[in-house]
Amino acid sequence: MEDRQIRERPARAEAAGRGVAVRLAGITKRFGDFVAVDDLNLDIYEGEFFSLLGPSGCGKTTTLRMIAGFEEPSQGEISVAGEQVQGVPPYRRPVNTVFQSYAIFPHLNVFDNVAFGLRRAKTPKDEVASRVADACEMVQLAGFEKRKPGMLSGGQQQRVALARALVNRPKVLLLDEPLGALDLKLRKEMQLELKSLQEEVGITFVYVTHDQEEALTMSDRIAVMNEGKVQQLAGPTTLYETPANRFVAGFIGQTNVFSGTVEAADGERTTLRTREGLRVEAVARDQASPKEGEEVHAAVRPEKVRFGGSGDNVSAAEVKQVVYLGASTQYIVELEGGGKLVLYQQNAFDATGPLEGDGVSVSWDAQNCLVLGG
Amino acid sequence: MAKGWSLGLAALLAPVTLWLGLFFLVPLLFIVAYSFGTSGAYGGITLGFNPGNYLLVFDPLYLEIIVRSFGIAALTTLLCFLLGYPLAYFIVFKGRRWRNALILLVMVPFWTSLLIRAYAWVVILGGNGIANKSLQFLGITDGPVDLIFTPEAVLLGMTYSYLPFMVLPLYAALEKFDVRLKEAGKDLGASRWQTFLRVTFPLSLPGVIAGSILVFIPSSGEFVIPDLLGGSRTVMTGNLIQNQFLQSRDWAFGSALSVILGVLLLVAIMFYIRRVGTDKLEGA
């Protein structure tokens, strides 16, 4: 079986010659005894759509607020566009923020909200007018300039927040879960819109989210964070196909995890036996091969398991639950060797799969079953 | 359904309507009626249509008192604002866990009658009061100086008395303020001061308006404080009205003065709300 290559969409950052837009060097942030961010080292490149992804309390928002200047790191150095910014107040940093619930000025109309930053920078009047008009046009708010924020929908307020930040042409745009308050359909639309907007203006976006799908949709690179540390830093495809550890595998997408003892290890090929007695063939990537007798975890994505067929792992199973999801169907099966397994099947041409209670055979390849580090 | 609801509403509103009708509206109509009457030589009043009471107000002596009253009330309002805004701002944004305790302290003076607190200032500012004694002890003055019975003493007493009326609405307005708007201001290049001027202050304007009205109205009609701290030299409209009713027994003129004070206040406040209440402060 050929070894599938993981191919990332060529990142714009690489094409742009990789100037560093934001550098975090040894950043630690403590609130009393609580360590919110723990020795973080990160380079974010110019023109990149970079996401900080993680569950709440993982330090992603704190990191963003340190770049914006609302928090000062307890240790370490931050530079934006090559300049150190510790001790520089937010209003002197070449960054702008799109806040979580927009923080639009309720007493100002759309025009004055968007013009706020330009006026503080003493921009000439006609330039303010033309740049505000361009910014409103860009986020499809032309014609709404005289409206007060109270008369706008959530999606429109979100566009005002975006225009208000982008109109200043910041070196880096910081976005703190900007789509969190929108409903699902609008959120999906805005994701694609944000991505194409970012490509259009070419400004570095640093995007904070807890929504893995959102991060996968938009980002050039994603830093998955947990407990103040970066768990893995990679492009969306790499992150999904080769998660570095159990946390990343569980956080990004759905996965089946086998925990067991290594029976045999030959190069990257690893055989483990689970507590239930199931033998699983897996591969260990990018890390030292586990030794015999070691306790490890291996994971296979639900869509990489199929009914029938042959492969490195074949097992008889009984279908326990069938969940029809439209484009695909999710099956939960109980393996003969013990343990449950989730698998997805595309409903591309027909929607006839096994039913609950059916006895089936499932199989998956060792190369899709990864031994997880950490 | 709708009928039952309106019946319930009527039942709820009846007591207050009755109360205000009997004890506010009816006396007010009496005052208006009296203001066109003629006072007898030994008190008493004959109703009729006598505009002379209103013409008397234009006597320079009385006009001066009315103008001075509004001047002192306006200065009191300004002083209360200048002292009260920083105080309310501090309590809301820097008070942290002391916030409730601090705002309670602002209300503590209400626990004592205004009259008693005014007398306290008489004791403090009097010829042998601690203010004069301290000045002499420090060698700043040789003998007692006139601290009491001056316009400044009235202003001091009124600002002291009405400060809570300014602080409380300001506190209420600032407390509702979303601190992330301050961050948004700074993020968009506004310094702390600019953020205050462009964001925090405009959004606290409802509190400023409420506070200044709450201070200005009672200040304009105040009579206890000018009586005790102003003496005969700083007579205000309130004292004038009080005199007509209690000493001169000229109820007709006293009523006319009351009506004029009321109308002037109403006009002044409407003008003020028009002026400040609009969105004039927006834009650059």
Image (tube, grey):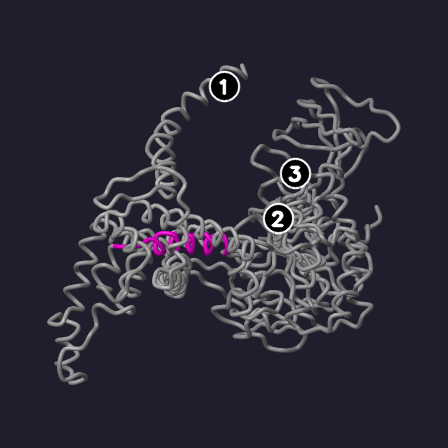
Choose the circle earlier in sequence order: 2 or 3.
Answer: 2
Placement of A351 over or under A47, stated as above or below: above
Left or right of B271: which side holds B233?
left
Q: Which mark is residue B5?
A: 1
Alpha carbon separation for disc pair 2 and 3: 21 Å
Report which quarter residue B82 is drawn in: bottom left
Disc 1 element: helix
Which region of the structure is painted magenta? Answer: B205-223
Q: Position of residue A305 (x, y in %)?
A: 75, 35
- Examine the rendering and report whether any part of residue A290 can be seen: no
Secondary structure of the magenta portion, mostly? helix
Q: Residue visible at 80% across and 34% down?
A: A310
Residue depth check, mark 1 versus mark 3: number of the one nearer the observer? 1
Residue type beneath disc 3: Asn
Pinpoint the chain carrying mark 1: B
Disc 3 element: strand
Pinpoint the chain carrying mark 3: A
Disc 2 element: loop
Q: Which mark is residue A210?
A: 2
Q: Residue visible at 78% across and 31% down?
A: A328
Q: Which mark is residue A256?
A: 3
Q: Residues within 10 Å of mark 3 (few under 14, many from 20)?
A: some
